[in-house]
Amino acid sequence: MSQHQRGATETQQELSLLSVRDLTVEFETDRGPLRAVDGVDFDVERGETVCLVGESGSGKTVTAETITKLIRMPPGRIVRGVAELDGRDLLSLSERDLRAIRGDRIAHVFQDPQHALNHCYTVGWQIREAIQVHEDVSDAAARERALTLLNQVGIPDATTRYDDYPHEFSGGMKQRIVVAMALAATPDLLIADEPTTALDVTIQAQLLDLLESIQTEYDMAILLITHDLGVVAELADRVVVLYAGKVMERGSVYEVFDTPAHPYTQVLFDCLPGRGRPLRSIGGTLPDLHDPPPGCRFASRCEYARKECHTGDQPPLYDVADAQTASCVYYGPGGDPDALRNGQSEGDPDG
């Protein structure tokens, strides 16, 4: 875990490195507009790790890729919102201005390194190119920097392997090379989208250790997209829980893990082995985002849902603890959050 958490209170008065507000994104489909992200808010402070968590279809990847406008437009469309890097709205920038930020101040590491690497070129050439895109340096200087990066991410015998092609590396080594490319311009923010999913458990642990060590070395913020709560526990300072394009809960990793507030977060943890409770699955399916239901997006699958959960808008994010909020009527006026914590259902999921 990064050093940020201990000093979080000191940085709250400062401008966040990344501030996302009311981010709303639609995709045009044969059935009409599909709202994949709907009013998402969160911040990433300098040097910290924020994890976007949720099951597949919750809007994690769309949120992350919209920040630097990597989604295809069309069919994608940014309906509204801002994503400010040091107070500068990335969503209002031209493609030319954004290219100067992508890879320089914000770098991406994607789930599948196979698609991030060009198999027609050696890995050394690709890292050197990434360096020279952002820095006016000679081939020799870029090569030395590339070798340094390969050593930093743990590629054995980097001098020899510099001239190898991607197909000559294992999946775990390819992902390390992708991380090296992302570090080429020493970014302020690394966006990592499910970077461990395609790796076996041992290699996953090694990659998490690598991300933690380079974050400390570069004083870099990380926005990590994952559905793996074990990864969250290992790396996160703060957690943002998404469901069907909406934020269900936000808080420090300690608060969210110790006392998950929203019923959706609670069920996510009940799906995680090793917590001393019987494993549960989440019944039902995600709502149709072509025509989202009124009320809380999770209401149809929630054992605690009351009638008011099925009407109006998604509940606001109510304060739960000092740095924890939850979008649930049980934390609002007249609500009884103890009913959630004690496992007492007050309603029928069908309202």
Image (cartoon, grey):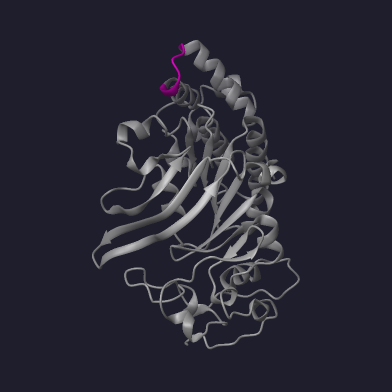
Taking depth in this image into account, of 169 and 11 the one nearest to the observer is: 11
Q: Main secondary structure of the magenta part?
A: loop
Queried whether the magenta region covers residue 132, the answer comes back as no
Residue 15, percent from left and from top = 54, 40
Residue 112 location, x and y as percent? 48, 45
Q: Is residue 93 visible?
A: yes
Q: Quick check: 123 left or right of 335? A: left
Image-based side of 333 in relation to 135, left or right = right
Which one is in front, 340 or 325?
325
Instruction: Specify start and end residues of the magenta stretch as a single range.
Output: 133-138
Query: For residue 229, which quarter of the picture?
Result: bottom right
Q: Quadrant of the N terminus?
A: top right
Q: Nearer the viewer, residue 251 or 162?
A: 251
Residue 194: percent from left, percent from top: 53, 50
What residue appears at the point 73 percent right and 66 percent down from the top-left corner? 274
Tag count: 0
**Residue 176: image location, x then y, percent:** 57, 36
> In terms of image quadrants, where is residue 213?
top right
* Residue with the most extreme right position: 276
Image position of 233 with respect to 102: above or below: below
Q: Image quadrant of residue 220? A: top right
Q: Is residue 69 visible?
A: no
Image-based side of 331 in relation to 41, left or right = right
Residue appearing at x 60%, y 55% in the figure: 239
Using the image, determine if residue 242 lies above or below residue 264.
above
Task: In this rendered view, identify the residue nearer to me: 322 or 104.
Answer: 322
Task: Name above or below for residue 41 compared with residue 15.
Answer: below
Q: Which residue is pictured at 50% across the width and 43% down the height?
A: 18
